Image: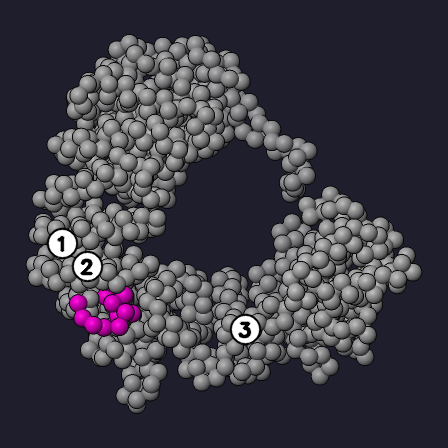
Amino acid sequence: MADVVDQDQHWLLNCLSATLDPNHEVRCFAEASLNQASLQPGFGTALSKVAANKELAMGLRQLAAVLLKQFVKKHWQEGEDTFEPPVVSSHEKVVIREILLLALDDSHKKICTAISMAVASIAEYDWPDFWPDLLPFLLRLISDQANLNGVYGAMRCLALLSADLDDKIVPTLVHALFPCLLTIVSSPQIYDAYIRSKAFSIVYSCTSILGTMSGVYKTETSTMILPMLKPWMAQFSSILEVPVQSENPDDWGIRMEVLKCMNKFVQNFSSLIGSEFEEVLRSLWNTFISSLRVYERSSIDGTEDSYDGRYDSDGVEKSLDSFVIQMFELLLTIVGNTRLGKVVVANVKELVYYTISFLQMTEQQVHTWSLDANQFISDEDDANYSCRISGALLLEEIVHSYGDEGILAIIDAVRQQYTECQSRKAAGNARWWKVREATLFALSFISEQLLEAEDSGLVASGFQHLVEQIITEDSLIGSHEYPFLHARIFTSVAKFSSMLSSGVLEHFLYAAVKAITMDVPPPMKVGACRALCQLLPETKNEITQPQMLGLFSSLSELLSQASDETLHMVLETLQAAIKAGHESSTFVEPIISPVILNLWALHISDPFISSDALEVLEAIKSIPGCLHPLVSRILPYVGSILSKPQEQADGLVAGSLDLVAMLLKNAPVDVARAIYDVCFDATIRIVLQSDDHSEIQNATECLAAFISEGRQEVLAWGTNSESTMRSLLEIASRLLDPTLESSGSLFVGSYILQLILHLPSQMAVHIRDLVAAVVRRMQSAQIAALRSSLLVVFARLVHMSAPNVGQFIDLLISIPAEGHDNSLAYVMSEWTKQQGEIQGAYQIKVTTSALALLLSSSHAELAKLSVPGHLIKSGEGITTRSKSKSAPDQWIMLPLPTKIVALLADTLIEIQEQVLAGDDEDDDWEEVQTGDDVENDQEFISSLSAAASGKPTYEHLEAIAKAFNEDQEDQYEDNLLSIADPLNQINLANYLTDFFGNLYQNDRQLFDNICQSLTQAQRNAIQMVLRR
């Protein structure tokens, strides 16, 4: 083969050169020729020889190495996802591996890197099983101090290999490798910063794997790592004790690798670290303090190079910021460690003091945020990772780990920074405002914890005075000179509004309104908007009203100038202003609505901005006197869109349906009727004809809202009630069609519930067909949320059939279900699997109580059914993918009555656990049941049965019922159901207590048999309520 390769060498070199030719046709022909040659034996060897040939041009050699790496991925290992035939022969693999290893000591760094990457790609398949001599060769190479090129190549190769190590290789590697690496990092006079950095990065990778292993093999890993801790800690200390150097990314880079290694040692082996930690901590402190001085000059003042956004040849960031972030990450880990954090607590005030100094805005941030308000808002809202954010997270961890002591340290450090800042300001220091802004940023970042401490009395009244002093001190300085300080002051006022005096709040409310109306820099307007969003809802009407007209005018003007993030913030502020003005804001509808409606249409493809605009319109709608003019303004617009949906821009139809649903929400009958006249028929057509899932979903919600608001009257609004009812049934048929994608049917459950709740007599005759269609839709559903919503329909039908629940069970038995004996078997299997995943207070009440009703029916068929109970644990150890394929999940099958009792007991456990956790929310589960609702239920189930049952009340259980009162106020679908359905009055804890009491009294044998199959926790929960 060597002769063939030699003969083809010239051809290959010409081909490689041609791939670099500026002529497109020449390049394409050369690439095609190389691709064809790659299918011939010896091609990989030929590439290896070119890459290793030091007589050739470096560009060609580098290209050959890159192509070799690609060749290996395609042809080295059969069975891999990237494999393409033919496979490289075993003999050729040996030749390629030998050539590459001998080329690792090349004097060109780029060639070393390219060859190392080729070696690593082969090692991914062959090492250690088929390439056992790889590691010994690399270890010999890094131990040869006379061949630094070889050391470089071997270290580069090991660094690449270490990223893909596993728990089998690392234990054998550490004993041989770590001593060699220790020699390298401790010999700066021999090895340069790059090689030493790579040594630390290899230690980091290995330590990460050992840390993962320590969870299972704690003793073995501890034994392995313990002898290495002291010498490595000594090296960490020796590097960190030297002050950080300015404009030296090599120095920052090696320190960053040290910090990463230390972080892993602390995370995984803190219990093994002894007295040497205090020495390392002293060195770390030297690095921390000296790096602040460098950071101030390089990043905050911008007088030195911070190497921001630059990377080394391996793609590793070498900026000062990345080093400082890594330092904060280590400090955060140390503070959060229960054992090592105690060493820091004595100096926590100093740690906070210097951390605040790191939070100062950099010159780059000032420049970027001054030019782009959107970026300023985005960075603030999303907390994009930076030195500033990582330092603030450290302060948060100090509060979390040190509690009261940490909070007091932060307040003391803030007071010291404030005093020193006053002196700098008086002395004319140009950077004084950055320190002040950083201090306020730090306070705002942990405002929740500080306010909690203030409420509990931990923080003395002097804290309120300190905060007010800081924010008022500079409120009169020039806005154009210090816009970011003004912005931070406004934001801080919003964060601490609950503790500031009314006089201070009023002052800043006026200042914020003034800032909105004046020509001030964008950052200041951003801060003003944030303050108004917080202050307006909490301010008395007599204070806000005189400002409203000017504020609305200015905000409307801002809307025309804003974009992206800024637009979101202005809309949020506008919404707060409308709600604050409320009854006296009737004048806003003709001023604001046209602007917002136009904005909504322009940004309909942006779900965030269009949603914000919709919320503003909803706020206008809620103002007394504004609903009718708003509806009159919107209806002609959306009516024309919905009547010709095919002609509209993407998203406009779905968005218009959202708009209609918003108008229908809690609308009086005359408004609902007016909307019906314009939109109902078009909405029906959209569901029946559209293929757009968003349009179908939103149209389904609109129709559910029409039924909810109009009830029986909705049938009389059209020209023919029978035709309207037929249309509603056609909608149900389309949405329940098993061939419709699940996403389109997502809200069919809510729609059907509205039909059976508000049009009971019309739906009663269709009950069998409805149940069969719901079963078919459930069986074809690909989305769990859709299946859950349809289970709520079955649960509601169970309630409607009471007290003759058995008749409904018989109905399910009589309806076939594919793959099951009947629909009862399918529905109960699915129900018992999904019950724990059902969301929403109303849905949980209805489904849980329905399960109890089913079991209370004592129907003979229930005991004949078995459903999945719980998972059988197979084998020991970690479940790998291969294990899961060979041994799929197996379930214990339980009789249906036992599974139902277990689910009800689990509900009791959840309630009781939340009570123990101290849930003190008000119990607003109890809803008033109207006579009309009761009549509707009775009418609907006249073909089956009717029922009513009393619920016992217990003081304790009324308290624990709060646990299931989930906050659903902002979910319109849930509101439609919970308000309209009398079942929402159920106190679930009382209901379950009643159920278990009756089961215990009336069927003791069944109760005892079931309890034998329950867990101890489930039995305890039942026993607790039985004792009540």
Disc with the residue nearer the chain's start (2 vs 1): 2
Which residue has dot 3 on it?
310
Q: Which residue is mark 2?
A: 556
Asked whether disc 2 touches disc 1, contact meaning CB atoms under 8 Å apart, the reply is: yes
Q: Nearer the viewer, residue 977 or 906?
A: 977
Q: Nearer the viewer, mark 3 or mark 2?
A: 2
Instruction: Examine the image and state in which quarter residue 51 appears.
Output: bottom right
The residue beneath circle 1 is: 591
Q: In 3D space, how far apart are the residues under numbered discs 1 and 3 (Cα atoms)?
A: 50 Å
Q: Secondary structure at mark 3?
A: loop
**Left or right: 919 in relation to 585:** right
Query: Which quadrant is the N terminus positioned in?
Result: bottom right
Q: Amino acid at mark 3?
A: Arg
**Residue 97 location, x and y as percent?**
82, 60
Q: What sort of colour scheme is used for the picture?
A: one colour
74 lies left or right of 718: right
Q: Is residue 29 above or below residue 938?
A: below
Q: Which numbered disc flags the more N-terminal residue, 3 or 2?
A: 3
